[in-house]
Image (cartoon, rainbow, N blue to C red):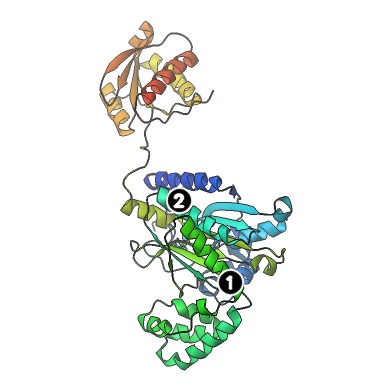
């Protein structure tokens, strides 16, 4: 039997990996401009952590977690809970009253795989812990928007407020009594959710439920004055930063820890998977997990979804994966000298390719084109004797003599200088010199 990757778990091949790296580099750059610092966390956590934070009556906890039941451990389905666990465990609030943290890595949910939905997927997750001001909500949303803009991905932004422990429970009661009246028109899932997690009925995707929900009481109209003020201030701040948004009063999110502001970056270009990124405030979560009474807000974006959208929407903007130089050898002595020179070039930061199989020059030049080498340095036994190699510019086909006198280290320095100079004259640079 042929062994293959399991359903919903994907290999990231080199052509895709370069796109992912570009996305990750942009994310790190932008997040760090906002004072975010990276945190790296384990993949396996106590099941209890996710049950208590995400909520027992959520799809994620009820049916999607990869759990080792006998050990009480779960492969993380998201990063927020793990960041809060680490925040509390290491008393990070003592170090800095406001912590800005981000993490990038794989998450696991046993969902039905389809385009943009996997069982192992990857998130860029950012959290600001310890700040209550509504400007923080807008700043975080603006950071997400800046990343998407930088990657040239078009999305729309929807926001909502889910209230707090003061205004949500009475609203929930009103919603439940409304849902009971119309239960005959709801799908089976929503009839069940009416009793387990009534807010989830508000974002059921079935058209019959949507019609019923359109007439349901609105949480936005039931917010307490503090939550109402907070939401208003978030909206004003977004307007001040010129971030376009619309309000979706039916957005409830699939995780139970949210309070007040929630938001989603949405697209129509990924079929059923509308959300590219999503997040919100979770003011009671840290305390609920046994930590100090601190609020927090964050979001996560799906790397697979961003990469798919970049392929579909954005013009090609990735750096070309190329080598700086291909070293072509001809003869026994040349092979030894070129092997040493290649190692020295790589030590000095030059991306260098070489072929050891003793193939013809024509075959080696073909290979140099395949690896997109900018230059080929041809050194046969004769060139070695004369101490003059041939440096061929692969795009113009022009050839120059290259001085092979001195140590390999000196030769590598001279070649690196030539490459550096040609970069400055407009060819794309990949050289990073290591002294
Ligand atoms: P979430 O809405 O469950 O939120 O996921 C955030 C993003 O992860 C989604 O918008 C999507 O891009 C991606 N995603 C989720 N599930 C999958 C999947 N099965 N396949 C591919 N991509 C997926 C959270 O996870 C929260 N922890 C976000 C957050 C951070 N809230 C506050 N802080």
Q: Is residue 148 left or right of residue 137?
A: left
- Residue 91 percent location from the top left of the image: 73, 56
- Element under disc 1: helix
Residue 196, by quadrant, is: bottom right
**Residue 135 position (above or below residue 434):** below
- Element under disc 2: helix
User: In terms of depth relative to the viewer, which is nearer, 269 or 218?
Assistant: 218
Between discs 2 and 1, the one toward the N terminus: 2
Q: Is residue 66 visible?
A: no
At x 55%, y 45%, the residue is 32
At x 29%, y 25%, the residue is 394
- Other-residue count near label 2 (Cα within 10 Å), few / some / many at <14 / 14–19 / ≥20: some
Name the quarter where the N terminus is drawn: bottom left
**Residue 407 position (above or below residue 70):** above
Q: Is residue 184 left or right of residue 49?
A: left
- Distance from disc 2 to disc 1, alpha carbons, whole Å, reads 28 Å
Q: Is residue 85 visible?
A: yes
User: In terms of depth relative to the viewer, which is nearer, 349 or 141?
Assistant: 141
User: In terms of depth relative to the viewer, which is nearer, 273 or 298?
Assistant: 298
The answer to whether the residue bearing label 1 lies less than 8 angstroms from the nearest atom of ligand 1 is no
- List the residue tagged with mark 1: 227
Name the disc covering residue 147, or none. 2
């Amino acid at each position: 039997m042929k062994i293959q990757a399991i359903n919903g778990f994907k290999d990231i091949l080199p052509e895709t990996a370069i796109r992912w790296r570009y996305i990750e580099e942009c994310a790190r750059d932008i997040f760090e401009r906002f004072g975010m610092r990276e945190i790296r966390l384990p993949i396996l956590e106590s099941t209890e952590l996710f049950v208590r934070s995400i909520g027992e009556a959520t799809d994620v906890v009820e049916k999607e977690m990869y759990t080792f039941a006998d050990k009480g451990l779960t492969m993380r389905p998201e990063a927020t809970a793990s960041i809060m666990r680490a925040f509390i465990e290491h008393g990070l609030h003592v170090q800095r009253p406001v912590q800005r943290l981000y993490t990038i890595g794989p998450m696991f949910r046993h969902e039905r795989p389809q385009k943009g939905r996997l069982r192992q997927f990857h998130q860029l997750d950012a959290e600001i812990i310890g700040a209550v001001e509504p400007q923080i909500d807008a700043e975080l949303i603006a950071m997400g928007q800046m990343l998407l803009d930088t990657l040239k991905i078009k999305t729309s932004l929807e926001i909502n407020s889910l209230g707090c422990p003061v205004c949500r429970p009475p609203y929930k009661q009103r919603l439940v009594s409304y849902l009971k009246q119309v239960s005959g028109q709801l799908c089976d899932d929503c009839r069940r959710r009416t009793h387990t997690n009534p807010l989830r009925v508000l974002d059921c995707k079935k058209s019959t439920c949507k019609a019923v929900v359109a007439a349901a009481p609105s949480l936005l109209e039931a917010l307490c004055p503090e939550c109402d003020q907070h939401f208003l201030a978030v909206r004003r701040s977004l307007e001040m930063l010129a971030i376009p948004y619309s309000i979706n009063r039916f957005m409830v999110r699939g995780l139970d820890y949210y309070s007040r502001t929630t938001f989603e970056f949405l697209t129509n270009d990924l079929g059923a998977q509308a959300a590219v990124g999503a997040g919100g405030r979770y003011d009671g979560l840290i305390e609920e997990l046994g930590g100090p009474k601190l609020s927090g807000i964050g979001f996560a974006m799906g790397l697979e979804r961003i990469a798919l959208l970049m392929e579909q929407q954005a013009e090609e903007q990735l750096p070309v994966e190329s080598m700086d130089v291909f070293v072509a050898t001809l003869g026994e002595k040349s092979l030894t000298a070129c092997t040493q020179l290649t190692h020295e070039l790589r030590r000095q930061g030059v991306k260098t390719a070489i072929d050891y199989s003793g193939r013809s020059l024509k075959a080696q030049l073909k290979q140099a084109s395949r690896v997109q080498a900018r230059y080929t340095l041809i050194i046969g036994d004769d060139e070695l004797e004369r101490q003059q190699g041939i440096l061929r510019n692969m795009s113009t086909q022009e050839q120059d003599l290259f001085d092979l006198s001195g140590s390999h280290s000196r030769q590598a320095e001279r070649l690196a200088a030539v490459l550096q100079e040609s970069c400055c004259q407009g060819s794309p640079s990949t050289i990073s010199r290591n002294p």
